[in-house]
């Protein structure tokens, strides 16, 4: 009940008392939450990474309210733990944070095709583009329907040719799969990609292919 009051009122004095209670009890998730309420997000991130309470940290940070560096470190944590959907989400959120706080992203630049790291040179636009590349890469690495939908939504919004190419190449492999289910799922995502990009002609073509597949499977007749 005391924690609920702190969450509702966002009282700093109450959060300090709650933080001390969590310290005494060894409640790392609680510490993480109270540090966020106190505005000590970087400290909360460091604690969360050490004690593997990053999910608790993410659930307590509103979308893109923290500094880009925080989301970058969280993304790397998820990447290292092979939680690729979550890594993609954090790279994408890092882009949003960098767009809102460009001065805080000036020393963060891309390294390689997909990864981003701290540096002392480069532009904010390069960093944002690299983060988007990373997000798409890890969404596709995850490969679940939810992750692929996230990649499609991202490229539909950003319209980067390199990121579109990533998704198209990945979907091309899926549609050529020997598995009928994988091929059908790949075609469905390809249709959604063309819709997201506003290419209705290609979307209509894919829809016809899907229709023929359904007919061949005996799901309906013309």
Image (cartoon, rainbow, N blue to C red):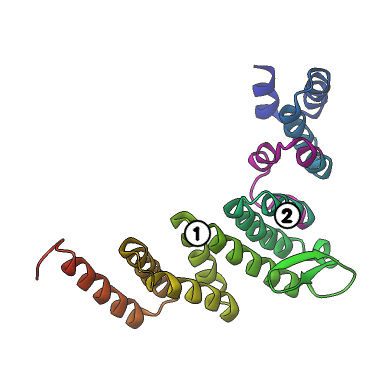
Structural distance between the alpha carbons of marks 2 and 1: 18 Å
Q: Does residue 22 appear left or right of residue 206 in this picture?
A: right
Quadrant location of residue 187?
bottom left
Q: What residue lies at 65% left-to-right and 65% top-to-bottom?
A: 134
Q: Which residue does the numbered mark 1 point to in the structure image?
A: 143
The dot on residue 76 is 2
Which of 164/82 is in front? Answer: 82
Q: What residue lies at 80% left-to-right and 70% top-to-bottom?
A: 109
Above or below, comparing residue 199 to residue 41 in the picture: below
Q: Which residues are magenta?
A: 47-68
Q: Residues within 10 Å of mark 1 (few under 14, many from 20)?
A: some
Q: Residues within 10 Å of mark 2 (few under 14, many from 20)?
A: many
Q: What residue lies at 76% left-to-right and 61% top-to-bottom?
A: 101
If you read the primary sequence from the N terminus, does the residue marked by circle 2 or circle 1 appear first? Answer: 2
Q: Does residue 15 appear left or right of residue 185 in this picture?
A: right
Q: What residue lies at 40% left-to-right and 75% top-to-bottom?
A: 194
Say what secondary structure mark 2 lies in. Answer: helix
User: Does the magenta run of residues contain 59?
Assistant: yes
């Amino acid at each position: 009940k005391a924690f609920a009051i702190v969450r509702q009122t966002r009282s700093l004095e109450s959060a300090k008392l709650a933080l001390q209670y969590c310290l005494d009890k060894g409640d790392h998730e609680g510490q993480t939450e109270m540090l966020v309420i106190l505005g000590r997000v970087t400290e909360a991130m460091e604690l969360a990474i050490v004690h593997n309470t990053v999910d608790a940290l993410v659930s307590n940070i509103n979308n893109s309210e923290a500094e880009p560096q925080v989301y970058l470190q969280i993304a790397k944590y998820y990447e290292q733990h092979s939680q690729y959907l979550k890594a993609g989400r954090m790279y994408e959120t890092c882009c949003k944070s960098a767009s809102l706080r460009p001065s805080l992203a000036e020393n963060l630049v891309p390294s390689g095709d997909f990864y981003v790291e701290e540096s002392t040179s480069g532009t904010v636009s390069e960093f944002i583009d690299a983060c988007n590349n990373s997000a798409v890469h890890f969404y596709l690495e995850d490969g679940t329907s939810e992750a692929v939908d996230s990649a499609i939504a991202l490229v539909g919004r950003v319209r980067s040719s390199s990121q579109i190419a990533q998704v198209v190449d990945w979907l091309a492999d899926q549609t050529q799969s020997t598995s009928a289910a994988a091929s059908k799922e790949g075609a469905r995502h390809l249709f959604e990609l063309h819709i997201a990009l506003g290419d209705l002609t290609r979307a209509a073509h894919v829809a016809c292919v899907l229709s023929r597949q359904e007919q061949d499977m005996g799901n309906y007749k013309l």
